[in-house]
Image: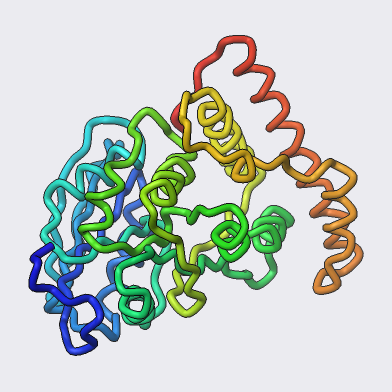
Amino acid sequence: MPKSLNISDCNTILSISIIIPVFNDQSGLNKCLQAISLQSYPTDSIEVIVVDNGSATPIVLADINTLKITLTQCATPGSYAARNTGVKIATGDVFCFIDADCWPDENWLRSALNTLREHKGNGIVGGEVKIIKQENPTSVALYQHITGFDQENNITNKDFSATANIICLRSQFERVGFYSESLLSGGDREWCWRVIKNGLSIIYEPKSIVYTDPRTTLRSAIIQARRVTAGRKMLQGLNMTHVDEKNLTKKRTPWQAITWILSRKELSIWERFHVVCVASIIRTAEMLETIKLALGSKAERR
């Protein structure tokens, strides 16, 4: 970042690099790019870098005349490796990370940049990630909607933000370093731990919103749960002096989880029963994955 750049100057137009890893999700990417083109921030100051992380059918770019979009490839499996590939060719003053299956609110960038300015470069921004509640949702979609990303709690109490919505200055990223490419899941936690270690804070900005659809099938939810379980296991096995145990706090006990779901007044009794069933199946899948990893199996990309 140029030394002359004054982050506190509200009149300074910052150049933005939006980095999007994508793996087998052409339709999600198209929706994401369309929403980016509608940002309230000047689009002529935005570059979008799409990183195809080995999709079975190669990704193609939608024709959006208002955006400068670059498509590049990353052969190393994993979204964190793909993000690093994007960073290496990014030219912006600010790096914005979003997933291909998300789409931003029109004020996503403007709200995040206002917060960066307010904190004078002393903190990165973690924005809100909202899982859309669908009409006539499946039980799995309901489960996903009520559990959500929990961004505010994660940022406020656990010092990490999901990489589905992270905005930082180029200089901050260079200070913290690249994402760990050895992790297929959990790399957001590891990177955010280094953010804290490097004397920066993580700021929750509720007005900087990205949206995503819930998973709707039990199979897709189980795949996600197994991946996250493997990521937590890999994090626990790394020799990182900056790991704070509060960030790997234990999940609710099965009884606590059931009680929490049954207390959700926005759901009918019948919906609560179905969501409890989904939660029980997912918890079982997580336990089996833990056993599998303990027996020596390696985490798989799913």
Residue 162: x, y in percent? Answer: 47, 54
Residue 130 in picture, x, y percent from top left: 55, 68
Between 42 and 188, the residue placed more toward the observer is 188
In the picture as drawn, the residue positioned furthest to the bottom comes out as 11
Q: Quadrant of residue 73?
A: top left
Q: Residue at x 57, y 69 (%)?
A: 132
- Is residue 281 something that shows in the picture? yes
Q: Quadrant of residue 284?
A: top right
For this rendering, which residue is in front, 142 or 198?
A: 198
Residue drawn at point x = 70 percent, y = 62 percent:
146
Q: Report the coloring of the rendering.
A: rainbow
State the residue in front, 134 or 82.
Answer: 82
Q: Residue furthest front?
A: 199
The vertical placement of 45 against 244, above or below, is below
Q: Which residue is at 76% across, 46% downward?
A: 278
In which quarter of the view is residue 236 placed? top right
Q: Is residue 189 above or below residue 128?
A: above
Q: Position of residue 143 (x, y in %)?
A: 71, 56
Q: Quadrant of the N terminus?
A: bottom left
- Left or right: 280, with 132 as reference point: right
* Side (left or right) of 193 relative to 154: left
- The x, y position of residue 246, in whole percent, is 64, 44
Q: Is residue 219 visible?
A: no
Q: Write the residue at 63% across / 48% down.
A: 217
